[in-house]
Image: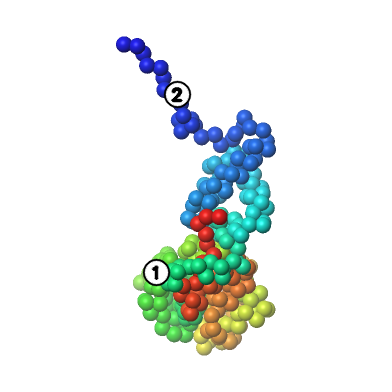
Amino acid sequence: MAQQPPAKKTADDLPFDRNLVGLPPELRWREWMNRVEAVIFASPTPVPRAVLARVVGDDCPLDAVIADIREELRTRPYDLMAVAGGWHHRTRPHLAPVLQAVRPAGAGLPALGPADQLLLATIAYHQPVTRRDLERLLGRTVDADAVGRLRAAGLVGPGPRSPRPGAPLTFVTTDAFLDRFGLESLADLPDLDDLRAMGLADTGVLDGTPAGAPDSPEPAGRASLPPAHRSPRPRPPAIDLAGPLAEVAATSDRVTARLQDLKPDDAGAASTDTASP
């Protein structure tokens, strides 16, 4: 029997070439840009830097590649945004009303009322925080349903057990919280002193003053934030429950468009996320 010739190797059989040493520098750079954008484009969630590094060369300056991609997208209705520890395609904030106009009623992320917004903002600034701590800070009962709504929306999850007697459960924000508000990390939360200076945070709740108390130390959870985001000794509160999370978010251009999803009268508001350019 005649010996069969060996099957020809296809591109799928060859080892993945990250370094592209056989290409001229200009083509090599362009291919790296295409690869990085393709991976981000195809992902429904932010893509971590470590994942992007797997498709480019060992000597590839990934930050410069992303910068060049973003430069090319300057005139496009979408951009690459650093959110939740990765990179993601996002439509530009000023186009939020356009997306809202074409999204079916009731679609999109669940709306949050002012009380839930305040609860979410308090968790964000004091995490990890127990329900008892939340009640102390807010001066009201925090029932399981309120926390449950935030958990159902994917914005809050369980944190480490508290070292207190009984080891109560704590709550923390999730990567979905960062993603939804266009934050790369908790360090991007607006500084409370800056908010006060702008007249956007006239409340003692976010900086650790319990409702009705003139002075109180900050919860231990604030130590998890960078020093620039820890408030000094809290001031006497002037509590305003009118949408503090919206006020926090309004100080950042990257977050403004997300507010469409939080307004209680806009349950069908459109998110500015996009699955494709």
If you read the primary sequence from the N terminus, does the residue marked by circle 2 or circle 1 appear first?
2
Q: Say which quadrant the N terminus sits in.
A: top left
Tag of residue 152:
1
> Dot 1 surroundings within 10 Å: few (below 14), some, or many (20 or more)?
few
> Dot 2 surroundings within 10 Å: few (below 14), some, or many (20 or more)?
few
**Are discs 2 and 1 less than 8 Å apart at CB?**
no
| Amino acid type of the residue tagged 1 in the rendering | Ala
Q: Residue at x 57, y 61 (%)?
A: 91
Q: Nearer the viewer, residue 241 or 262?
A: 262
Q: How is the image coloured?
A: rainbow
Q: In the picture provided, is 145 more to the left or to the right than 70?
A: left
| Amino acid type of the residue tagged 2 in the rendering | Lys
Q: Residue at x 41, y 22 (%)?
A: 7
Q: Residue at x 41, y 80 (%)?
A: 142
* Tally of marks: 2
Place of residue 206 in the rendered image (x, y in percent of width and height, measured from the top left): 55, 77
Which residue occupies the extreme bottom position in the image? 212
Residue holding disc 2: 8
Place of residue 247 in the rendered image (x, y in percent of width and height, measured from the top left): 58, 77
Q: Secondary structure at mark 2?
A: loop
Which residue occupies the extreme left position in the image? 1
Which residue occupies the extreme front position in the image? 102
Place of residue 229 in the rendered image (x, y in percent of width and height, measured from the top left): 60, 69
Q: Nearer the viewer, residue 253 or 136?
A: 253
Residue 87 falls in image quadrant: bottom right
Residue 165 falls in image quadrant: bottom left
Q: Is residue 241 visible?
A: yes
Place of residue 157 in the rendered image (x, y in percent of width and height, measured from the top left): 42, 66
